[in-house]
């Protein structure tokens, strides 16, 4: 190809794996080129180049420009050393069919060309049901960037960015693109579960989602997570604190006994007594557990054989009233203490305290899923799953902003375990993960999947990341601190959406999660604009710098910074701090200090017309 071609950049001088060195043409007098009426930046880091090889074109990404990209023996000559580029090859095209990966490499002296708008349309121009549009190219805003939906969901993804980089807006925009809009959204069979730690997304996705909240606002549904669906170890750590082996056995034996009694009284589909374990999700009463154990711990006995209970008042399990026994006495007269007691009074007092604490009602008193003393609950896990995953909206938002921090990680682990276990074992059913996949979006993931976490949430997220692809459960990990996300989880994310990251440790973790030949592209992370991202991985046809679509203003997440300048210039209107304290005490943003009694009258159009006729 002649160097007079306006797209001509230079020639290949060295090839090393997927990395090539390009010497720029002497005919390039400036860093700008006008081709077909469009202006292109020549050799801009992150831009694309094309290398024709017969019927085939290779495409690469510019990773480095200038003297540092020149060979060692050229760098001493400063004028010529500045006219070099390092390019990382990423894909190839035959005709209009573009594929990632390489079937061949260029040779020395092969021509290198600017990628024009027509070339970009060859890469990104395909529109079908397997792709979702997420934004536009930063270098060509008329070219839409599309991601493979299959790879985005099944191969997992991560959205990473510092605070204020547009992370929440990017997630909301991507979910809207996945679901579609208008009639497409209404008829969508998408199934997305969003764990909303800060309560940001109800306003952004409320028209597409069913919202569950531990502190529900008008129009939201109460969030209930049955405690009996937790693994016994996690549940006991929360309700009873630290337990030694003997104390743990006392609790687990009693839980097993109560679950067996429930199963014997009313069989459950798919479960027999021989396969029952202490971790099997069978309803049982925590109140009855507490009452039986506290009765055993505090009992005193009389009689020659010391086997006659010295009971004064029986107490009541339902009201958490302990039984009263005659206090034990010294000497041979009795009453005598229970020598078989396990020494778990402190743990039982904590259990009673948890049951009485209204902050934990969503898990310890889960509405229609709370069993009675016999272990019978009004509803079972099937209705819970139907409420979360079986409604007619494509997105389910679990608003966890009102959940106390002491139970947040366990709650997330419980939710993910319920969902994953259900879809794992029902993979051959129509509502299983294989026939109707699920995307789980995990906001603020670093809070519960840190490398030193070792909690049930981190364990189940690792399991989803490692094997969820085979069972139709995909993960989207969202975090502002990639360095605090477990490396195993991040390495399983096939697609990375990296927004602005200024912390060098965070940037290092993102670079480590990418193939080596793309790490140079991540040097752009500190200078990305708000709402701009570098997308790389299996869902992207090429590593690309993208301007993410901005949702309409009414569908933006509640994550914007307060307008300090405007707020501090506005004249203060005192409304009384009694309203502040009322919301604090009620743990609700809409609580009021005084209920206003307003008498309202119905106004009809007929009455208004009569009034106008009279006048």
Image (cartoon, helix red, strand yellow):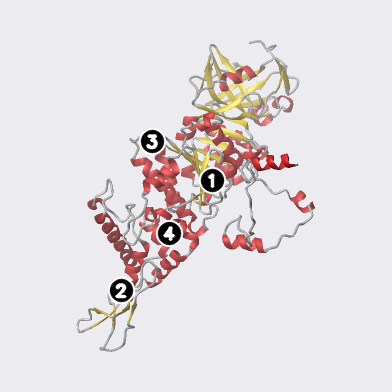
Viewer-nearest of discs 3 and 2 = 2
Residue at left offset 29%, top offset 60%: 258
Residue 497's place in the image compared with 593, above or below, is above
In which quadrant will I find the N terminus? top right
> Which quarter of the picture shows residue 261?
bottom left
Q: Could you tell me how far apart the alpha carbons at marks 1 and 2 are, in whole angstroms?
A: 45 Å
Return the mark for residue 548: none
Viewer-nearest of discs 4 and 3 = 4
Image-based side of 36 in relation to 111, left or right: right
Q: Residues within 10 Å of mark 4 (few under 14, many from 20)?
A: many
Q: Earlier in the sequence, mark 4 or mark 1?
A: 4
Question: Label 2, on which residue?
Answer: 341
Q: Earlier in the sequence, mark 2 or mark 4?
A: 2
Q: Could you tell me how far apart the alpha carbons at marks 4 and 1 are, in whole angstroms?
A: 24 Å
Q: Position of residue 443 (x, y in %)?
A: 54, 46
Instruction: Find out whether the residues at labels 4 and 1 contact each other: C-beta distance under 8 Å.
Output: no
Q: Position of residue 24 (x, y in %)?
A: 68, 21
Q: Residues within 10 Å of mark 3 (few under 14, many from 20)?
A: some
Q: Nearer the viewer, residue 36 or 337?
A: 337
Q: Residues within 10 Å of mark 1 (few under 14, many from 20)?
A: many
Residue at left offset 54%, top offset 50%: 197
Return the mark for residue 443: 1
Residue at left offset 38%, top offset 41%: 423
Q: What kind of element bears circle 4?
A: helix
Q: What kind of element bears circle 3?
A: helix
Residue 75's place in the image compared with 505, above or below, is above
Image-based side of 491 in relation to 314, left or right: right
Q: Earlier in the sequence, mark 4 or mark 3?
A: 4
Return the mark for residue 470: 3
Question: Label 4, on which residue?
Answer: 364
Q: Position of residue 26 (x, y in %)?
A: 72, 18
Instruction: Find out whether the residues at labels 1 and 3 contact each other: C-beta distance under 8 Å.
Output: no
């Amino acid at each position: 190809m002649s160097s007079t071609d306006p797209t001509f950049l230079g020639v290949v001088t060295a090839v090393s794996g997927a990395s090539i060195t390009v010497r720029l043409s002497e005919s390039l007098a400036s860093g700008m080129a006008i081709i077909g009426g469009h202006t292109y930046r020549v050799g801009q880091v992150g831009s694309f180049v094309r290398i024709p090889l017969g019927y085939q074109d290779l495409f690469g990404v510019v990773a480095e420009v200038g003297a540092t990209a020149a060979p060692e023996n050229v760098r001493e000559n400063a004028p010529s050393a500045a006219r070099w580029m390092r390019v990382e090859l990423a894909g190839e095209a035959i005709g209009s069919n573009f594929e990632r990966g390489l079937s061949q490499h260029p040779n020395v002296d092969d021509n290198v060309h600017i990628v024009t708008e027509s070339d970009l349309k060859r890469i990104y121009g395909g529109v079908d049901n397997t792709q979702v549009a997420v934004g536009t190219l930063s270098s060509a805003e008329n070219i839409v960037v599309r991601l493979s939906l299959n790879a985005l969901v099944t191969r997992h993804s991560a959205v990473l960015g510092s605070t204020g980089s547009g992370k929440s807006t990017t997630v909301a925009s991507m979910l809207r693109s996945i679901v579609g809009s208008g009639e497409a959204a209404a008829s969508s069979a998408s199934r997305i579960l969003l764990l909303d730690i800060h309560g940001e997304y109800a306003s952004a996705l409320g028209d597409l989602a069913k919202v569950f909240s531990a502190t529900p606002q008008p129009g939201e549904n109460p969030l209930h997570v049955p405690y009996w669906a937790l693994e016994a170890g996690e549940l006991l750590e929360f309700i009873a604190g630290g337990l030694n082996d003997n104390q743990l056995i006392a609790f687990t034996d009693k839980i097993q006994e109560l679950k067996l009694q429930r199963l014997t009284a009313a069989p459950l589909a798919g479960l027999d007594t021989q396969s029952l374990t202490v971790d099997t999700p069978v309803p049982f009463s925590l109140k009855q557990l507490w009452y039986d154990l506290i009765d055993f711990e505090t009992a005193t006995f009389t009689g020659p054989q010391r086997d006659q209970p010295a009971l004064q008042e029986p107490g009541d399990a339902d009201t958490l009233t302990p039984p009263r026994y005659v206090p034990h006495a010294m000497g041979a007269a009795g009453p005598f203490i229970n020598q078989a007691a396990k020494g778990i009074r402190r743990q039982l007092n904590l259990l009673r305290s948890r049951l009485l604490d209204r902050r934990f009602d969503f898990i310890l008193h889960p509405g229609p899923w709370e069993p009675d003393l016999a272990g019978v609950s009004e509803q079972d896990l099937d209705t819970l799953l139907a409420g979360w995953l079986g409604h007619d909206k494509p997105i389910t938002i679990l608003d966890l902003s009102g959940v106390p921090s002491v139970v947040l990680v366990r709650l997330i682990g419980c939710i993910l375990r319920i969902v994953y276990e259900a879809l794992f074992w029902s993979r051959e059913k129509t509502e299983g993960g294989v026939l109707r996949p699920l995307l789980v979006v995990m906001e603020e993931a670093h809070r519960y999947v840190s490398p030193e976490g070792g909690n049930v949430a981190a364990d189940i997220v690792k399991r989803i990341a490692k094997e969820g692809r085979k069972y139709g459960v995909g993960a989207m990990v969202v975090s502002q601190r990639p360095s605090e996300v477990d490396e195993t989880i991040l390495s399983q994310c096939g697609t990375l959406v990296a927004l602005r990251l200024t912390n060098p440790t965070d940037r290092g973790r993102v670079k480590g999660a990418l193939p080596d030949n793309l790490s140079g592209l991540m040097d752009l992370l500190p200078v990305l604009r708000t709402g701009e991202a570098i997308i790389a991985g299996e869902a992207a046809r090429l590593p690309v710098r993208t301007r993410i679509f901005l949702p309409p203003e009414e569908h933006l997440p509640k994550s914007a910074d307060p307008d300090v300048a405007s707020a501090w210039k506005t004249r203060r209107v005192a409304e009384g701090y009694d309203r502040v304290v009322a919301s604090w005490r009620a743990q609700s943003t809409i609580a009021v200090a005084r209920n206003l009694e307003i008498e309202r009258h119905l106004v009809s159009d007929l009455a208004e017309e009569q009034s106008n006729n009279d006048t």
